[in-house]
Amino acid sequence: MDTNWKVDSMHSEVGFKVRHMMISNVSGSFGSFDANVVTDGDDFSAAKFDFSAAIDSINTGVADRDGHLKSGDFFDAENHPALKFTSTDVKKVADDALEIAGNLEIRGTVKPVVLKAEFAGIAVDPYGQTKAGMTVSGSIKRSEFGLTWSAVTEAGNIVVGDDIKLNAELQFIKQ
């Protein structure tokens, strides 16, 4: 029997990290996102995941940088307002671990990616809602999605790295 789960955005976060000047990481997050999962009962090992995040909600803690990320140099939020992920296959790799394969769409480019999910389990909250939690991680190359803006310092250092580390803490509410 299909069970529907909706992300609990109050208890979830979606973030990323990228190398800056090749010596440190800059972190960011998306404040507005949506995710739905369809499972067979409470079994997430063959789940179907759908996720989207609003590009306009990107936040790195620096307004000028956020504006640059939303511009045509990077995400082009005006023409591509959301990034999207739809799973194509889920594999249980351990009692508490899943591999979630799917298609990630950024800036109109769709590429296959594999994400790792650490499944934390299912619990009932004080209000009687059944919740499931997981940590999802992965990495992509931004250049593969048309995010090719680059700059080099006078010393020859690349300003923004190509590898993006993705990390999400997700809590879902059984519908």
Image (tube, rainbow, N blue to C red):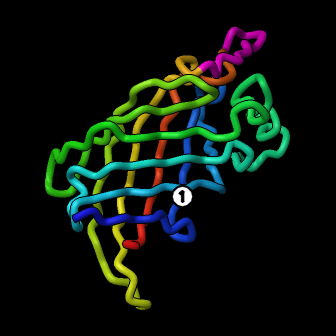
**Residue nearest the observer in this picture, 10 or 5:** 5
Quadrant holding the N terminus: bottom left
Quadrant holding the C terminus: bottom left
Asked whether, in this view, residue 39 is left or right of residue 14, the answer is left
Furthest toward the right, the residue is 64
**Residue nearest the observer in this picture, 140 or 158:** 140
The percent position of residue 135, horizontal first and vertical second, equals 38, 55
Asked whether, in this view, residue 34 is left or right of residue 129, the answer is right
Q: Is residue 144 magenta?
A: no
Q: Residue at x 57, y 70 (%)?
A: 10
Image height of 158 relative to 25, above or below: above
Quadrant of res 39 = bottom left
Q: Residues within 10 Å of mark 1 (few under 14, many from 20)?
A: some
Q: Residue at x 65, y 16 (%)?
A: 148
The percent position of residue 53, horizontal first and vertical second, equals 60, 47
Image height of 30 relative to 120, above or below: above
The percent position of residue 65, horizontal first and vertical second, equals 79, 37
Which secondary structure, mark 1?
strand
Tell me the kind of residue under disc 1.
Glu
The magenta segment:
146-157
Provide the residue designation for mark 1.
Answer: 13
Q: Is residue 152 magenta?
A: yes
Asked whether, in this view, residue 100 is left or right of residue 52, the answer is left
Q: Residue at x 25, y 43 (%)?
A: 90
**Residue nearest the observer in this picture, 67 or 23:** 67
The percent position of residue 89, horizontal first and vertical second, equals 27, 39
Asked whether, in this view, residue 27 is left or right of residue 117, the answer is right
Furthest toward the front, the residue is 1
Q: Residue at x 64, y 29 (%)?
A: 20
Quadrant of res 129 = bottom left
Image height of 157 relative to 6, above or below: above
